[in-house]
């Protein structure tokens, strides 16, 4: 480890804190060292928020560090039975467990909380207020003040979005200190600059067609953003910018900002938000994918977004711009030319392999990605320099890319380039395979989108074109685009109607080409996976031969948790960054500093003046700004001191026992609510616990929350309410609550971050309609007069409502609540799996009274499908068995 990494580890061990590192500074290595320390001792430590990939990498790293299998990191998931988990906790160790499972186990005392050595929270940027992690840490600190809490993150951006996000996350984690380690920190900068890395930056120009396509997509993106701002003035104009739109989370953040008024957002605005995501992805695919794959994706987007006679409102309006027509034309010309193209006669005839399903009138161009030829030149240069640097011994070469698709394409391309017959024109290549697949799939897509299409060319009457939609008649950005002299569309001239007709003509010509393809298309089935990663019996060797590391070219995808391990395993002298990535640049700096004897050379490839380059530079700038803002917030934020182990004041009035003379008060008991296990998927249990209410997890047959011996609550979100009405499940649930409880309650809960209104008073119909949700609610209250309905705007409001309802009420008993609705008391530690149980309870004929009989009689759902109807009748009765048997064995469709 480097000096700054040792310093970070020392500070982490010394005190509880939230540690935030810049991406690529070795956070995974630091976490491994911390976990390794506790694996070697007799400690009980929990790791939260780690994903399966991180767990696998941690286990592998600990195994390589010499940790025995019985001391290694243990992963606990929903498949681990409750009694097994209890035994594992008793034997101590380091456990990676999901927050939901750990919260339930801690509340049920399966975990010896006073014996916990500490809790490590990975990916702390994902922690939110009122999350299950907050419940775990509150329960942990209530009974254990000596154990540690360590939180880690290498993603600084979420800590600066919103109001005081860093302070909020620290409060949820019950931490008061934060350690910030940006790239510009003095110790980090000194360590990484001590050994310089030989970096060769190669700014590859894009092809002329790619430049035109990129320019057209950016113009479409600007027009879409302008229209979105015009239709939604409440959006922050400083954030809705062209630069921010290049990032993956931009359209998601727009949806989040409009979620509270989503019911008021027009369909046109919703389509514009979808278009932003499509345009951003097209900009990424332009530099990442080959010309054929890019054109295929573009065709799909065009087919799905083109206006039709039946739908003139819901379509992608950017397709009606002149820039969109330019993008479509240039993307097609990168793959093939048609006889009416101006370049058709000036382009040489294609002499290479021609797919058999391609019309003879077309002329292939198959433009290569400019980076492919550059990569070939780099490898040739490395081969020449390798002999001089290693005296002919060779050296490993590492090529890093972003996606698996790029990895597969480069692998196939390098194999073709190394083939002695690579220059053979008649030999099929990766690109010709992709073209053949394009024409094979094309016809099927057109048939799906236009089932009435015939072999004739679709015709449109040019004499009476359809009027342009309102988007083109009233859009102010179209006027601005016409007066801009430097744009591609400004030079095309023409009217808006002509622009619309051009796009429609391009789509129609695409359909015509497809129909021509069908005439020449034999029965051909091509698997894309076989095209990119060909595997045949001829390529599989019957012998395994060890390939020397010095003679290998490794193509690998960026993996944040494994970048350091990839460099250590391959030990490359030459690293080619095919796609730019700031985090991997720092991983190389650390690798070079740890191995000063290796003269590592790095080739940094990026398209010049491209969106790819802009995103890379913006990521570095945004990261620097995020750390600067956190440094300022750290200097002036106020974090309240967490309360000690003091029992909160009992705000609930003790129930009066009328049997005692004078109505003496019963001994005060802490407020308690029985919560169904399945309810731990939502944030209400942590909120209830923060209100001073004891939460008792239990598998309930009837209801979701038991507030008192007489009060049962069934919680429904809006989506659950609609689906429960549709399936009839809500009727069964209300029937069971009314039968076993004096006060059955239906809680209809809204999400305070989303808009989900019902009909306004003016829209309510005078007569009951069977399909109307309000009519169904009226019928439900008529059927069950005892049923009470509570409307709650948020989970926080629900917790206050529950607190009011519990006043002057006795506390419920978990054993009694679990036994209601069954033939006897149920064991909460049973071996049943929750997911199959939920599936079984949702089937017709299954009720709260008979589902346990089925679960005890058959092993799993597969065995249930094999049970005959007479046997089911013996178990649950004639009519329920008939419904269940028909549901299982009736053919779909």
Image (tube, grey):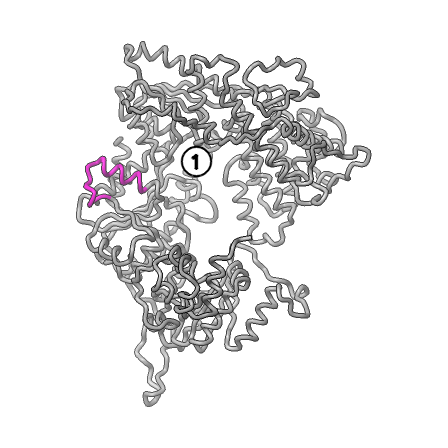
Q: Is residue 59 magenta?
A: yes
x, y (%) of residue 85? 26, 55
Expressed as whole percent of the image width and height from the top left, the position of residue 550 reads: 30, 18
709 sits left or right of 318 in the view: left
> Most extreme residue toward the bottom, as rendered?
661
> What residue sits right under mark 1 in the picture?
623
Label 1 residue SS: helix
216 sits left or right of 80 in the view: right
Q: Which sits in the foreground, 404 or 227?
A: 404
Q: Position of residue 359 (x, y in %)?
A: 63, 23
Q: Based on the displayed image, in which of its 4 quarters is residue 821 positioned?
A: bottom left
In the image, is residue 434 above or below residue 640? above
Q: Is residue 477 magenta?
A: no
Disc 1 crowd rating (10 Å Cα; few below 14, some 14-19, many 20+) is: some
Q: Is residue 469 visible?
A: yes
User: Which residues, given as a range, are shown in magenta?
Assistant: 55-72
Q: Residue reaching furthest left?
A: 41
Q: Quadrant of the N terminus?
A: top left
Q: Residue at x 42, y 60 (%)?
A: 840
Could you tell whether 307 is left or right of 744 in the image? right
Q: Is residue 675 visible?
A: no
Give the vertical position of 134 relative to 398 (above or below).
below
Question: In the shown orientation, is residue 697 left or right of residue 526?
Answer: left
Q: How would you classify the magenta stretch by its main secondary structure? A: helix
Query: Residue 442: horizontal and vertical position, in percent?
Result: 60, 32
Give me the residue at 66% from left, 20% from top: 361
Number of numbered discs overlaid on the protein picture: 1
């Amino acid at each position: 480890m480097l000096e700054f990494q040792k310093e970070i580890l020392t500070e982490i061990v010394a005190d509880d804190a939230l540690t935030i590192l810049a991406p690529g500074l070795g956070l995974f290595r630091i976490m491994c060292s911390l976990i390794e320390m506790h694996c070697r001792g007799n400690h009980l430590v929990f790791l939260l928020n780690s994903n399966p990939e991180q767990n696998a990498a941690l286990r592998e790293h600990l195994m390589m560090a010499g940790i025995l299998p019985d001391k290694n990191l243990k992963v606990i998931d929903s498949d681990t039975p409750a009694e097994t988990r209890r035994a594992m906790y008793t034997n101590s160790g380091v456990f990676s467990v999901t927050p939901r499972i750990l919260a339930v186990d801690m509340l049920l005392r399966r975990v010896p909380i006073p014996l916990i050595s500490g809790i490590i929270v990975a990916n702390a940027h994902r922690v939110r207020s009122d999350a299950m992690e907050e419940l775990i840490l509150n329960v942990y600190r209530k009974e254990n003040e000596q154990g540690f809490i360590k939180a880690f993150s290498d993603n600084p951006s979420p800590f600066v979005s919103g109001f005081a996000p860093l302070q909020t996350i620290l409060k949820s984690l019950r931490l008061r200190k934060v350690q910030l380690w940006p790239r510009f920190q003095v110790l980090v900068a000194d360590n990484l600059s001590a050994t310089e890395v030989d970096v060769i930056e190669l700014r590859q120009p894009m092809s002329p067609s790619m430049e035109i396509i990129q320019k057209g997509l950016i113009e479409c993106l600007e027009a879409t953003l302008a229209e979105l701002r015009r239709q939604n003035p409440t959006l922050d104009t400083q954030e809705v910018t062209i630069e921010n739109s290049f990032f993956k989370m931009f359209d998601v953040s727009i949806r989040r900002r409009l979620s509270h008024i989503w019911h008021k957002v027009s369909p046109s605005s919703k389509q514009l938000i979808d278009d932003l995501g499509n345009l951003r992805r097209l900009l990424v695919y332009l530099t990442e994918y080959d010309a054929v794959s890019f054109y295929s994706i573009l065709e799909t987007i065009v087919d799905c977004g083109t206006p039709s006679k039946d739908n003139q409102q819901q379509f992608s309006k950017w397709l009606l711009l002149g820039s969109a027509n330019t993008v479509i034309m240039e993307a097609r010309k990168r793959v093939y030319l048609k006889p009416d193209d101006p370049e058709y006669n000036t382009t040489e005839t294609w002499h290479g392999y021609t797919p058999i399903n391609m019309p003879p009138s077309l002329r292939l161009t198959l433009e290569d990605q400019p980076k492919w030829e550059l990569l070939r030149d780099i490898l040739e240069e490395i081969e020449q320099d390798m002999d001089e640097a290693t005296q002919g011994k060779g050296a490993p070469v590492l090529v890093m890319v972003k996606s698996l698709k790029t990895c597969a394409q480069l692998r196939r391309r390098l194999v073709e380039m190394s083939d002695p017959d690579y220059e053979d024109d008649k030999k099929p290549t990766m690109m010709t395979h992709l073209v053949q697949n394009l024409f094979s799939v094309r016809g099927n897509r057109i048939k799906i989108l236009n089932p009435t299409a015939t072999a004739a060319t679709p015709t449109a009457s040019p004499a009476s074109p359809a009027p342009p939609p309102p988007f083109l008649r009233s859009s102010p950005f179209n006027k601005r685009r016409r007066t801009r002299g430097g744009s591609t569309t400004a030079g095309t001239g023409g009217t808006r109607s002509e622009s619309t007709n051009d796009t429609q003509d391009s789509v129609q010509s695409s359909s015509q080409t497809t129909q021509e393809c069908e005439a020449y298309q034999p029965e051909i089935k091509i698997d894309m996976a076989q095209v990119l990663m060909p595997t045949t019996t001829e390529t599989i060797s019957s012998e395994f031969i060890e390939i020397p590391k010095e003679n290998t070219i490794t193509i690998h995808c960026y993996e944040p948790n494994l970048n350091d391990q990839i460099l250590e395993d391959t030990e490359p002298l030459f690293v080619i960054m095919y796609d730019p990535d700031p985090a991997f640049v720092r991983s190389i700096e650390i690798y070079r500093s740890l191995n000063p004897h290796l003269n590592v050379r790095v080739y940094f490839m990026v398209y010049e003046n491209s969106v790819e380059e802009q995103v890379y530079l913006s990521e570095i700038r945004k990261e620097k700004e995020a750390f600067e803002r956190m440094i300022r917030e750290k200097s002036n934020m106020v974090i309240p001191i967490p309360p000690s182990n003091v029992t909160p004041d009992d705000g609930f009035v003790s129930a009066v026992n009328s049997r005692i003379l004078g109505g003496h008060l019963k001994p005060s008991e802490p407020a308690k609510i029985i919560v169904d296990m399945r309810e731990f998927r939502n944030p209400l249990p942590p909120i209830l616990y923060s209100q001073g209410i004891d939460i008792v997890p239990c598998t309930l047959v009837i209801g979701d929350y038991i507030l008192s011996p007489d009060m049962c609550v069934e919680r429904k979100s809006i989506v659950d309410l609609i689906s429960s009405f549709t399936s009839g499940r809500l009727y069964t649930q209300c029937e069971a609550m009314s039968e076993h409880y004096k006060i059955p309650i239906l809680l209809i809960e809204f999400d305070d971050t989303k808009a989900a209104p019902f009909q306004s008073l003016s829209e309510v119909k005078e007569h009951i309609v069977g399909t109307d949700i309000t009519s169904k609610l009226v019928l439900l209250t008529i059927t069950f007069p005892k049923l009470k309905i509570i409307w709650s705007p948020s989970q926080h409001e629900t917790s206050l409502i529950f607190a009011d309802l519990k006043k002057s009420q006795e506390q419920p008993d978990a054993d009694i609540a679990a036994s209601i609705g069954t033939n006897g008391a149920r064991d909460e530690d049973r071996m049943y799996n929750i997911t199959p149980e939920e599936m079984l309870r949702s089937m017709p004929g299954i009720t709260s009274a008979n589902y346990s009989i089925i679960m005890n009689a058959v092993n799993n759902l597969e065995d249930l499908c094999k049970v005959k109807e007479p046997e089911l009748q013996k178990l649950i009765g004639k009519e329920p068995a008939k419904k269940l048997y028909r549901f299982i064995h009736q053919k779909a469709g």
